[in-house]
Amino acid sequence: METLRLVMDPELHINIIDLGLVYGIEIEAPKKRVKVEMTLSSSYCPMGESIVSAVKNCIEGHYEGYEATVDLVWEPVWSYDSITDEGKRLLGL
């Protein structure tokens, strides 16, 4: 989870963890696989593909030999309530 704080939303310049975009992480250590379940702020997010690629690259770059997959989900729907207190502070909310 902490490693994914390195992945920034390119428009808001806040990491995806503090934005509340990551819903879960499943690690299969014996098979060296990491599955990330996440959403985007909108299904029309113009940077969605870039964010998903950044998540994969971040995990695979920090954990040698691991393969990352990202499942985009739309339920529950993301809202401002998903943002952490730190994320709200960084956004000036």
Image (tube, rainbow, N blue to C red):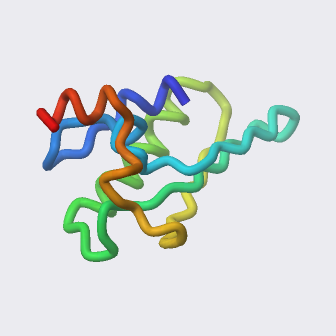
Measured as percent of width and height from the top left, residue 70 is found at 55, 56
| Quarter of the image where the C terminus is located | top left
Q: Quadrant of residue 39?
A: bottom left
* Above or below: residue 39 compared with residue 7: below
Viewer-side residue, 9 vs 56? 9
**Which residue occupies 18% across, 46% down?**
10
Viewer-side residue, 86 vs 30? 86
Q: Is residue 33 left or right of residue 48?
A: right
Residue at far bottom of view: 44
* Above or below: residue 93 compared with residue 23: above
| Quarter of the image where the N terminus is located | top right
Q: Quadrant of residue 55?
A: top left
**Which residue occupies 56% across, 50% down?**
23
Viewer-side residue, 85 vs 22? 85
* Above or below: residue 35 compared with residue 8: below
* Above or below: residue 34 compared with residue 3: below
Measured as percent of width and height from the top left, residue 81 is found at 37, 51
Measured as percent of width and height from the top left, residue 3 is found at 49, 25
**Which residue occupies 38% across, 35% down?**
84
- The total number of labels drawn is 0
Residue at far right of view: 30
Measured as percent of width and height from the top left, residue 57 is found at 44, 40
Q: Is residue 69 left or right of residue 44?
A: right
**Which residue occupies 62% across, 47% down?**
24
Q: Is residue 3 left or right of residue 35?
A: left
